[in-house]
Image (spheres, rainbow, N blue to C red):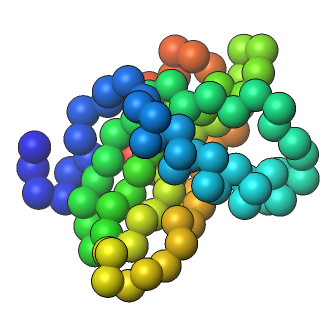
Amino acid sequence: MMLGAPSECRPATAETQQIADQVKRQLEEKENRQFPVFEAVECRTQVVAGTNHFIKVHVGGDEYIHLRVFESLPHENKPLTLSNYQTNKTKDDELEYF
């Protein structure tokens, strides 16, 4: 992997789901809607001055949302931040850098 480049896509883990769950409320506020289904399915990471987590989340039916969540360095002691997201995604849409 090239320094600063996103990792390869891999299946989501329990840790990935925890990260997605921690920013769910931020997404719901930005979208002004509730997501009864919120299942992380795949992810990739990018090491910067912290870590960007790119997460594909199934939100019900055929609808998916791609999240970019920033995790600061441990010594900064900051919460996870939903830094960007993309709606209207499908199961087959590739999880890319955005």
**Side of 34 where 66 appears, left or right:** left
Asked whether residue 88 is in view, the answer is: yes
Tell me residue 43's x, y (percent).
40, 35
Residue at x 63%, y 47% (from the top left corner): 21
Q: Is residue 11 above or below residue 81?
A: above
**Side of 65 where 94 appears, left or right:** left
Asked whether residue 95 is in view, the answer is: no
Tell me residue 37's x, y (percent).
76, 28
**Side of 64 where 78 appears, left or right:** left
Tell me residue 89's x, y (percent).
63, 28
Tell me residue 24's x, y (percent).
70, 50
Q: Is residue 44 above or below residue 27?
A: above
Residue at x 23%, y 41% (from the top left corner): 7
Q: Nearer the viewer, residue 18 or 81?
A: 18
Residue at x 9%, y 49% (from the top left corner): 2
- The part of the image, by quadrant, that contains residue 30 is bottom right
Q: Quadrant of the N terminus?
A: top left
- The part of the image, by quadrant, that contains residue 54 is top left
Total labels drawn: 0
Residue at x 42%, y 29% (from the top left corner): 12
- Outermost residue on the bottom side: it is 76
Q: Nearer the viewer, residue 88 or 31?
A: 31
- The part of the image, by quadrant, that contains residue 10 is top left
Q: Is residue 12 above or below residue 29?
A: above
**Side of 87 where 28 appears, left or right:** right
Q: Nearer the viewer, residue 28 or 6?
A: 28
